[in-house]
Amino acid sequence: MVRIGKNLLTNPFATSRSSLTCTYKCGNACADDAPNEFSDNQYFGDVAKQAFSQRAFSRRAALKVTGASALAVGGGAVLAACSSDDSGSAAGGSDASGTTAAGDGSKGESPEGMRFDAVKPNTEDAVVIPDGYEQNVLIRWGDPIHEGGPEFDFDKQTPENQLKQFGFNNDFAGLIKAEDGTLLYVCSHEYTTEPMMFRAYKKEDATKEQVDIGLAAHGQTILAVEEDDKGFLKPILSDKRNRRITGFTEFTVDGPAAGHDLLKTKADPSGMKVEGTLNNCSGGVTPWGTYLSGEENVDQYFGNVGKLKDEDTVKKLKRYSVKNEELSDRAWEKYYDRFDVSKEPNEPNRFFWLVEIDPSDPNSTPVKHTALGRFKHEAGQIYVTDDGTVVCYSGDDERFEYIYKFVSSRKVKEGDLKHNMGILSEGTLYVGKFNGNSESEIDGSGELPKDGRFDGDIEWLPLMTAKADGKHESHVDGMTAEEVCIYTRIAGDKVGATRMDRPEDIEPSPKTGKVYAALTNNKYRGKASPDSSGKTQDNKAAKKTDGAGRPYEGATEVAPITENKNGLVLEMEDDHAGTKGKWNLLLVCGDPNEAYTYFGGFDKESVSPISCPDNVTFDEYGNLWVSTDGNALDSNDGLFAVAVEGERRGETKCFLTVPVAAETCGPQIFSNRVMVNVQHPGEIETDQGHPVGDNPDPTTNPTSHWPDGGKEQPRPAVVQVVRTDGKKIGV
């Protein structure tokens, strides 16, 4: 299969991701069947289809159908539960579900936090910001994190140096205030793109040095920072807490699955110690001052599935997308047996967890929490109820996978770190079932149902309860509690969870308690169309099935177009510690000129186009901020502010865009500063528009030279933006 520039493949509804990014970020997850082919569970599209009756709208009506990261202070700050009665809290009033009515955007001004000139769509090789703002780079790939550390030299990289330098492709970020008042910047390094790191790289010829550099560039960075007079952060390289956690770092395992036979290997017969963490995507900051990081697309690092003889093992590996028949994309198994499943079939079971790291103690051992379930964790965001119960939300980032939450049995104890680091080890793991409230279908025109919103109810189905006495309880027939933790996807299949469209970051609002989830896209929603050659991306197209082996669906309410290429933003009013909730769609993303898009009821003529939502956070005013990944609208990815309450609910404005071929990650919104992680800038395998076959080395003439300009190689980096006049962001 020839891959040219963007990830066109033979896919008629692709995003802007290049095939290079698809290969190294997620192992070409969209090029193959979805792994959820073992379940006939309800699909969210079906739910939404049943939720509403159709209604014809006038042309004007159709046009109108249109966080701050938790700063843990001394480990004591918590997200407080919202009032049970928030009616009247928004100027526009509320409907029966608590959703505030939106205006038409023709009058008034944007809410506080969103009063800036929206950045227009563009394809610049730069971070583009509004007038009146300025930017700089906090740190970039290869910069030293210690005083006197090795300076970066693209052509003289070593594993030893990379262990002391900022890692590659930075994703989630947070800012934690330590007990002594020092700010600690924490950051995940999701993946490495070896062809962008090494000259003329070929996996078949990968050296051990290149493999070790790649392993060292994964993981996390902890970096002490301080604020200057303008509000920019700068590194404190002398701080002893500065630390790299990598693919070589030892982790301990806790929860029900700790020590289970399915976690044991030759190198670790105890099943309690895991070497490394990989593909760490989004995460979260806890109220007790620790850092959560989700292991996501780990499947791609393992090879030689074709040599396995046990059919049950192969089936379970493939349920987690571990499917490389021979050599993996990085060929790490050439030097390390742990990446060869024919030699270590249990090694993949030691990944796909949510990990917890104490950034204040450079000698602490990070933890993999098995009670939170094993799947492609995009996030681990915390909500604390009035009585101190901790609720952790997480999405499984793959087509047709599920949304989960974990409800602790332990309560938060302010100032007791030892106690609090055990909170995510005891409690109940749930998976979401999303039910509609009406039976009619929509016809793909983009028209809203007669009640004017997309909504329904949520049931949280229990999977497993981890108890303090070690006597864990399974709620899934035919599976032990330990098996539920290790094969959480299969447990979700069994209980009838609702299949979603790539649930990525999920985060509760610190002001209202409502929970927001980015559903990035799902190209298999609806009937696939052939390209000019008559071929389709879907290898089951002849059977008229989707990528998970189920019949194609037409337009649904949750995605009122035949292909969901631009994604959705889901809003949930959850009872958090309980088992009930409500859902509605805040955004149906895309070009506002298209009839199918929806912006919370706000006038579509007054919003920024947005595509492929990925990460979410909040500012101090309660506005939702959304970063994007894979913009399908022929523009660079960006960071968007969205009003979620009041008369301007649904108003969407672009605050910044990132350089060509880059992804916007890890947004942090403070009163005086916006920060984003710019991931994989210039990651396109072309030479001045020519196919990669004409230029097998993308480092010879890179598409991007950001952030250093000139003829420099592109480098993932952290960008921060402040107002030139020193005032608050967006006011």
Image (cartoon, helix red, strand yellow):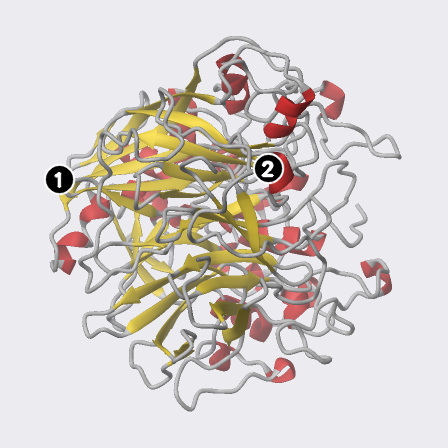
Secondary structure under badge 1? loop
Label 1 or label 2, whichever lies nearer to me, is 2
Whole-percent x and y of residue 391? 26, 40
Q: Position of residue 438 (x, y in %)?
A: 47, 10
Residue identifier under label 2:
589
Taking depth in this image into account, of 510 and 150 the one nearest to the observer is 510
Residue at screen point 65% across, 24% down: 60
**Residue tagged 1:** 387
The type of residue carrying mark 2 is Cys
Mark 1 neighbour density, 10 Å: few (under 14) some (14–19) many (20 or more)? few
Q: Residues within 10 Å of mark 2 (few under 14, many from 20)?
A: many
Res 348 seen here = no
The amino acid sitting under disc 1 is Asp
Up the image or down, 638 lies above or below 164; here it is above
N-term mark: 1 or 2: 1
Horizontal placement of 614 versus 147: left or right? Answer: right
Please name the residue shown 13% across and 54% down the image: 419
